[in-house]
Amino acid sequence: MAKDNNTKYSASQEDSMKSKVEIKQPLPQNQEKISRLVGSVFIGMGILLVAFGIFSFIKFREEPLLDPELEAPAAASVTSITNDETIVVKGEAKGYDSIFVYVNEEKVGEAKVGDDAKYSFEYTVEEQGEYSIAVAGVKGFPNRYISPMSESKISVVDYTSPDKDTVTIKYGPETNKDTFILIGTTEADATIEVKRGTESFEGLADKEGKFRIEGITLDEGKNVFSVYITDLAGNQVLLDEKVRITYSASGDVNGDAVIDEDIPQAAGTFDEIFGNQLMMLFGIIALLAFSTSSTFVYLKNRK
């Protein structure tokens, strides 16, 4: 009886397990062929896409072909002179994808052209000197074409400060006026700054290096100013020599405390010349009055 029960239990357990296991039937032969064919097609397309990508990348990286008919973009803005290590090139390149930047006729980099047709590129220099900057426009894919180079512009990198030994300044050490004039020479186109505390007075040297700064205000008593020279590149130097002037409103020193024999006021003779001219004017008026009265008396007596 026990044996029959065990046999029944095993059969029941087997049926339960079969109901839980899904038995898959093999695919029909034609359907399996179709699956393999579709898979092969996708694999082939993937290989072709990879091959095209590699080809396009290699083709794009090649130097573009020169098209003389293309109009060269302009390097509208190039750092003209600086004491920095970076030259900035900016401009517009409408119709181009990118631009090549050339320094001294050698390609140094590439910049993308934005949707607004503008581009910007920074070139880092290794030493001071003059650099010739030009650009060319590039467009096309995968075949790329390049325009002729633009007209070059010169950028000067200068790390050298003005030479203090070549700077000359002239002024009078005493004055009875509340302002004075400073004249002198330095390198061409430099900026001269006369400074005392928060007060600052500036002048610009001409092409020959001559400068003249007027209206520098003074306080009663002794005044001390520092002089700074800054070149076009931005290099600045502080002169060792200070400007020292004594201002006394009750003093008898003529002029604006500047030494320049070509300028009467600066030489301290302005008041004397003005006085002499005034006396001469009065003398001429007196002479004319005497001549007129004498002529009138003479004509009256003849009548």
Image (cartoon, rainbow, N blue to C red):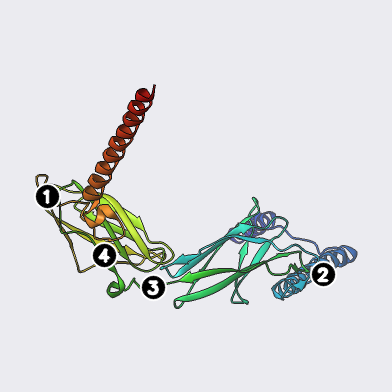
| The N terminus lies in quadrant | bottom right
Distance (Cα) linking label 4 and label 1: 24 Å
Q: Amino acid at mark 3?
A: Tyr
Query: Residue 134's spot in the image, x, y percent?
Result: 62, 69
Farthest front residue? Answer: 302
Tag 1, which secondary structure? loop
Residue at image point 24% right, 60% down: 259
CB-based contact (under 8 Å), mark 4 and mark 2: no
CB-based contact (under 8 Å), mark 4 and mark 1: no
Distance (Cα) linking label 1 and label 3: 47 Å
Residue named by callout 2:
40
Residue at image point 41% right, 68% down: 83
- Given this view, does label 2 or label 3 mark the residue nearer the observer? 3
Residue named by callout 1:
252
Distance (Cα) linking label 1 and label 2: 109 Å
Distance (Cα) linking label 2 and label 3: 66 Å
Q: Amino acid at mark 4?
A: Ile
Q: Amino acid at mark 1?
A: Asp
Q: Amino acid at mark 2?
A: Ser
Tag of residue 159 = 3
Earlier-in-chain disc, 3 versus 4: 3
- Given this view, does label 4 or label 1 mark the residue nearer the observer? 1
Viewer-nearest residue: 56 or 259: 259
Residue named by callout 4:
169
Q: Is residue 80 left or right of residue 184?
A: right
Earlier-in-chain disc, 1 versus 2: 2
Earlier-in-chain disc, 4 versus 1: 4
Earlier-in-chain disc, 1 versus 3: 3
